[in-house]
Image (spheres, rainbow, N blue to C red):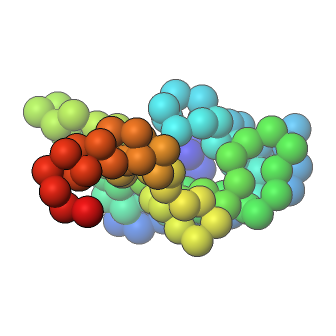
Amino acid sequence: MSAQGAFSQPVWISRGSWSYASNQYINDTGCGNIHLAGCTIEVIGNSTNYTIRIHTPTTSSSGVTNGDFIYVNNGTDYSPGWRRIYNNKYKPTASDIGALTQSTADGRYVGLINNNGIY
């Protein structure tokens, strides 16, 4: 991205072509591979303090689809990292948000409720 001028402007926006062979992918996100073919990429900031947003297409042969990813780096004293935004196509699971599944709740709490006279 920097070779394309991403850090030479305060705000830089680009869109990858649909050529998988002509585009790179990012594989160190911890959120899955982001193939840049068909993605919209936004860079806000400069080479030392910046935010990158990537919006992936709805289809892909080798990357995450329907994704919105953000990378934030605020300098050397900051712990930069990727995160993925939940949306209507990428909904969180119960474990993603720390909720109990129905079977866990049934098994763990029904006896507790019965034993404490709630029923």
If the image is split into quadrants, where does the N terminus sit?
top right
Image coords of residue 18 (percent x, y)? 86, 56
Q: Is residue 65 visible?
A: yes
Residue 109: x %, y % from top left: 29, 46
> In this rendering, would 32 be left or right of 99?
right
Q: Residue at x 48, y 32 (%)?
A: 30
Q: Quadrant of residue 15?
A: bottom right
Q: Where is residue 78 drawn, in percent x and y?
A: 16, 37
Q: Residue at the bottom extreme?
A: 88
57 left or right, relative to 54: right
Q: In the displayed structure, does residue 45 sit left or right of residue 113?
A: right
- Residue 56 place in picture, x, y as percent: 66, 58
Most foreground residue, 76 or 71: 71
Q: Residue at x 33, y 48 (%)?
A: 110
Q: Is residue 41 above or below residue 34?
A: below
Name the quadrant of the C terminus.
bottom left
* Residue furthest top as drawn: 28
Residue at (73% x, 42% y) in the render: 63
